[in-house]
Image (cartoon, coloured by chain):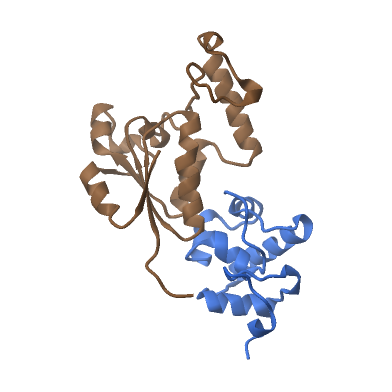
C-alpha cells in the first residue's frame, strides 16, 4: 500500500438538538476509527453539544418535525402540549442506548479520547456569553478564519 | 518466505478466511501495517477473536473498550493509524461493519 498524506476531515456542527448532535459525533468517531484526522468545529446551537451544562440535556423538537420515528410520531398540534418534547427526547435517548451509542456527553469525551480536535466558535460564544470554561475540558476557542485555515486540504462537512 | 504468502487477503488487506488465522499471522500482519504488538495489544486481539468465535464478526471499538480494561486512548495508542481497521486486520477478521 502506497504511503499517502493522511486524510483530513473538518466537520462544522451548527445544530444543538438531540437528533442533530449525533451525526457529527458519529462521523468524527468513524473517521478516527479509520485513521482520518478530524477537526470538529461547533458553532451557534451546535455549541450546546460541548457546553458542560447543556450537553446531556439536549432535546428533539416535536413541533414542525415531520421525520419523527414512526413509532413515536407526534402530530404538530399535540406537540405543543407541555412535556411532549421531553417525552420524545427520553424515548430517543432510550433508542440510542439500545444501539449501544453513548449519551452526548460521553460521546464527546469518546471522540476527544480518539484524538478529535474540538473547537468552539468564538463569535457564537461571545453572543451566548460563554467562555472556554463553559465548554467541555480540552475544547479550544477558535475564530472562523482560523478554522478555515486549519481546514486547508480537508474534506469539509456542514451539519 | 513470509507466513503471509500462504494465506489470502482481500483488496483492503483483511484476511479472507478468519479461520486460518494464527498468532504468527497476527505478528506478520502487524509488521506489514507498521504496528508493534505488545502484551496490551493481545488483550484486544484475544477479545476480538473470542467475539468472532461467538458472534461471527469483529467487535465494535465500543465493545472492546467496554468489555476489556483497554480504554479509548490506549486503544488508539496501541493501533496508531486507526484501531477500527487495524485491530480487526491484525486479529484476522473482516472489516468491522459497526458504526462505533
| Residue extending farthest right | B54
Quadrant for the C terminus of chain A in the image: top left
| Residue extending farthest left | A145
Question: Any idea which chain is the brown one in this picture?
Answer: A
Whole-percent x, y for residue A101 in the image: 58, 41
- Residue B86 in the image: above or below residue B98: below
In depth, the one of B70 and A69 nearer the eye is A69
Q: At 64% from the left edge and 82% from the top edge, which residue is drawn?
A: B4
Q: Specify the quadrant of the image occupied by residue B45.
A: bottom right
Horizontal arrangement in the rendering, residue A11 relative to residue A57 (left or right): left
Total numbered labels placed on residues in the image: 0
Q: Specify the quadrant of the image occupied by residue A87.
A: top right
Any part of residue A71 in sight: yes
- Residue B85 in the image: above or below residue A59: below
Q: At 42% from the left edge and 35% from the top edge, which residue is drawn?
A: A49
- Residue A77 in the image: above or below residue B59: above
Any part of residue A143 in sight: no
Whole-percent x, y for residue A55 in the image: 45, 32
Whole-percent x, y for residue A29 in the image: 49, 50
- Residue A17 in the image: above or below residue B4: above
Q: At 32% from the left edge and 36% from the top edge, which residue is drawn?
A: A43
Whole-percent x, y for residue B82 in the image: 50, 62
Horizontal arrangement in the rendering, residue A125 relative to residue A67 (left or right): left
Q: Colour of chain B?
A: blue
| Residue extending farthest bottom | B1
Amino acid at each position: 500500500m502506497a504511503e499517502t498524506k493522511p486524510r483530513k476531515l473538518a466537520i462544522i456542527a451548527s445544530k444543538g438538538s438531540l437528533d442533530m448532535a449525533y451525526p457529527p459525533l458519529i462521523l468524527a468517531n468513524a473517521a478516527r476509527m479509520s485513521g482520518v484526522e478530524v477537526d470538529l468545529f461547533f458553532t451557534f446551537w451546535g455549541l450546546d453539544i460541548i457546553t458542560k451544562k447543556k450537553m446531556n440535556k439536549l432535546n428533539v423538537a416535536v413541533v414542525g418535525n415531520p421525520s419523527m420515528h414512526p413509532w413515536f410520531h407526534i402530530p404538530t398540534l399535540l406537540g405543543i402540549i407541555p412535556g411532549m418534547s421531553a417525552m420524545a427526547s427520553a424515548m430517543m435517548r432510550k433508542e440510542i442506548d439500545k444501539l449501544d451509542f453513548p449519551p452526548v456527553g460521553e460521546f464527546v469525551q469518546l471522540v476527544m479520547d480518539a484524538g478529535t480536535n474540538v473547537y468552539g466558535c468564538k463569535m457564537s460564544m461571545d453572543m451566548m456569553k460563554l467562555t472556554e470554561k463553559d465548554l467541555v475540558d480540552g475544547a479550544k476557542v477558535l475564530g472562523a478564519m482560523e478554522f478555515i485555515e486549519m481546514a486547508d486540504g480537508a474534506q469539509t462537512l456542514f451539519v | 518466505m513470509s507466513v503471509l504468502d500462504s494465506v489470502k487477503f482481500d483488496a483492503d488487506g483483511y484476511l479472507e478466511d478468519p479461520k486460518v488465522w494464527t498468532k504468527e499471522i497476527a505478528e506478520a500482519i502487524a509488521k506489514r501495517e507498521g504496528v508493534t504488538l505488545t502484551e496490551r495489544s493481545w488483550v484486544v486481539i484475544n477479545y476480538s477473536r473470542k467475539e468472532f468465535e461467538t458472534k461471527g464478526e469483529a467487535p465494535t471499538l465500543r465493545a472492546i473498550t467496554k468489555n476489556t480494561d483497554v480504554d479509548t486512548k490506549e486503544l488508539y495508542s496501541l493501533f496508531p493509524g486507526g484501531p477500527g481497521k487495524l485491530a480487526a486486520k491484525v486479529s484476522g477478521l473482516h472489516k468491522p461493519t459497526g458504526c462505533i
